[in-house]
Image (spheres, rainbow, N blue to C red):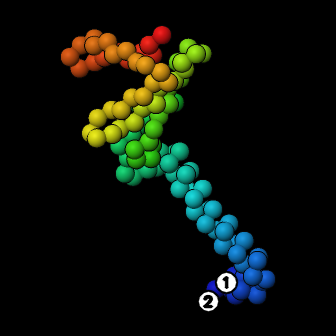
Amino acid sequence: MKKSEENIEKLPKWVQFKIQQLERDLVDVLQREKELLGSVEDSNVLMCGYSFKDDNPLPRDSHIEFRTTDKKYPNFIVSIRDGGLYIQGSTAVTIEPSASNCCLIKIRN
């Protein structure tokens, strides 16, 4: 047993529980930091060329919000679902094909 563990065991139980809670919180924060820094190993969502860096992976199956300049219907939520791109607008959307492999999706006014 390490010296620090022995010292913790001598502390009151409520302090021991608080230390354990802080240790768990630290693990969560470190994982979140990895995700934000693009150190995610298993990802299917990338933030492309942001800030002149290489593509950065986001957590697997992330939902991404895009905000438009329209104050009344301002956003799209985009995610990967069932092998496709799932796009949900804050209201009805219009899909305008522009090529066989490209389309424009707008919030319908």
- CB within 8 Å, label 2 to label 1: yes
Q: What residue do we see at 66% from left, 73% from top?
A: 20
Residue 83 image offset from top left, x and y in percent: 27, 39
Numbered circle sitting on residue 5? 1
For the view shown, which residue lies furthest in the left direction?
100
Element at badge 2?
A: loop
Element type where label 1 sits in the image: helix
Which residue is located at x 44 percent, y 47 percent?
A: 59
CA distance separating discs 2 and 1: 7 Å
Is 37 positioned to the left or the right of 96 in the image? right
Amino acid type at circle 2 is: Met
Residue at the (66%, 68%) spot, across then down: 21
Residue closest to the far right = 12
Disc 2 designates what residue? Answer: 1
> Residue 41, position in %: x, y?
39, 52
Q: Residues within 10 Å of mark 2 (few under 14, many from 20)?
A: few
Q: Amino acid at mark 1?
A: Glu
Note whether 62 is above or below 97 in the view shown: below
* In the depicted structure, whether residue 73 falls above or below residue 8: above
Tell me if residue 34 comes above or below residue 51 in the rendering.
below
Quarter of the picture holding the N terminus? bottom right
Please state which of residues 49 and 65 is positioned toward the viewer in this rendering. Answer: 65
Q: Is residue 56 visible?
A: no
Give the percent coordinates (x, y) of residue 54.
Answer: 42, 36
Q: Which mark is residue 17?
A: none
